[in-house]
Amino acid sequence: MSYEGINIYRHTKFYIFMKANIPAKILLCFIFLSISIKSKAQTFHAIILADTQDPQIGITVVKDLSSMSKRLDSIATKIGYQMHLVVMSNQNFNSKALESTLQQLSCNPDDIIFFYYTAHGYSPTEKNDSRFPYLYLKDNNSFSLEGVHQQFVGKKVRLCITMGDCCNNLIPSSALKQSRLITRGITTTQDAEILAKLFLGYRGSIIVSSAEKGKKAVADPLKGGYYTFAWLEAIRQASYNNVTIDWEHLLKDAENRLQQVEAFLSSNEKHSSIWQVNVTPADTPAPINPEPAPVTPPTPPVVSFDEMNAFLNSLANLKTPYQQREKLRQQKSTQLFAPNALVAIYIQSPDKPVEVKPIDEYLPTVLVSPNIKGFNFIERLSRVGPDGRYSLITIQEIR
């Protein structure tokens, strides 16, 4: 896949009829019907603005562009949407390409827009009330992430998501050209169901920034943008490991993962993501049987997926003093786990754990293990008791 300039990709199917004995009128009707059906297909518009030629962060942006475009294409396929990918990069990383895309993008009410910006960003010190960053497009720096988001929201689609992996540090606009920024400133049925819940189960808009106002964002050539890496991990893990998920908990889990990736950084280098979710559950069709048999809903767990992930990974963080982590373990264990609760541990396949042991025996070993770098909590293979506490948790050790 080439990312030269501004590229537009539409994944469509074309039908060629070779049978000469098909009557012309029937053939024309069939073609017209095929085109009519196709034109009504819902579209996933993935709009990516990436500064791939920046001399300082270009190599990390290329990584982001590749990772995000592949993931969005996979999401579109799994929720049954036609993919429409627009990439503005290289010589077309500029305000003219963005303005053209905003003006020309045509959408239907059930379409989805996902705008992703990976480049330098900043927060102007003058006349700026937004929490979210401005885009550093070099030819025109008047575009804010929030302003672009509102223009996409104006397309009136079912779901509009805007994400910026860039800095949000305070810089006077007059100093932009002189500043030398070295950071970002200036598969299975299960995952298809979870992705459908996230992207089709809600209507509204979401805006996300990788860094809060006044902060820079971090990237490296291996991972790309740290927030992009954390978000992709969060949605991948949720799609495979969750039973239920919503956007707030997904973004909280992405933030938890961002903090794990940044654990080795000094305090002044770390940053936190910010977001605003304005969605409501999508309308669901009325049941065929207006009076279904009553079903007792399962007991909800006392903690969410992202909270359990954060708890487990906090125990494994050797940079936190042992006494502090042991105190956390003692405080949380009785709240989260039923008496005699078990933990199933796996390395590759969660359906084939390598070991099952009592949680009370396992967690103390986590506090002193130098080999465990973190955890993924497998919610769909864990069990909750009648009081909401877990009688079994299934986890993946990251080594």
Image (spheres, rainbow, N blue to C red):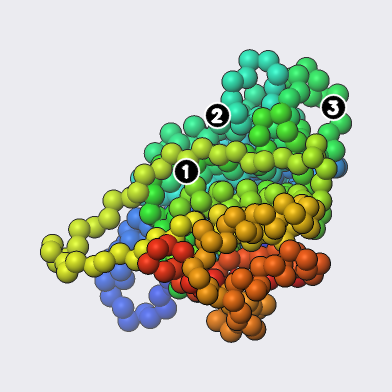
Q: Looking at this view, is 343 or 72 the one in front? A: 343
- Callouts 2 and 1 close, C-beta under 8 Å: no
Residue at x 45%, y 36% (from the top left corner): 153
- Residue 247 visible in this rendered orientation of the protein: yes
Q: As displayed, is residue 324 above or below residue 295?
A: above
For marks 2 and 3, the one nearer the N-term is 2
Callout 1, which amino acid? Answer: Cys
Q: Which residue is mark 2?
A: 147
Q: Position of residue 275 (x, y in %)?
A: 56, 39
Locate residue 234: give its quadrant: bottom right
For marks 3 and 1, the one nearer the N-term is 1
For marks 2 and 1, the one nearer the N-term is 2
Q: Looking at this view, is 70 or 320 the one in front? A: 320
Locate residue 94: give its quadrant: top right
Residue at x 70%, y 19% (from the top left corner): 125
Q: Position of residue 139 (x, y in %)?
A: 72, 28
Q: Residues within 10 Å of mark 1 (few under 14, many from 20)?
A: many
Q: As displayed, is residue 198 above or below residue 22?
A: above
Q: Secondary structure at mark 3?
A: loop
Q: As displayed, is residue 122 above or below residue 219?
A: above
Residue at x 85%, y 38% (from the top left corner): 182
Q: Quadrant of the C terminus?
A: bottom right
**Quick check: 308 left or right of 54?**
left
Q: Quadrant of the N terminus?
A: bottom right
Callout 2, which amino acid? Answer: Gly
Q: Position of residue 269 (x, y in %)?
A: 80, 40
Callout 3, which amino acid? Answer: Ser
Q: Which residue is mark 1?
A: 160
Q: Residues within 10 Å of mark 2 (few under 14, many from 20)?
A: some
- Callouts 2 and 3 close, C-beta under 8 Å: no
Q: Which residue is mark 3?
A: 179
Q: Could you tell me how far apart the alpha carbons at marks 3 and 1 are, in whole angstroms?
A: 33 Å
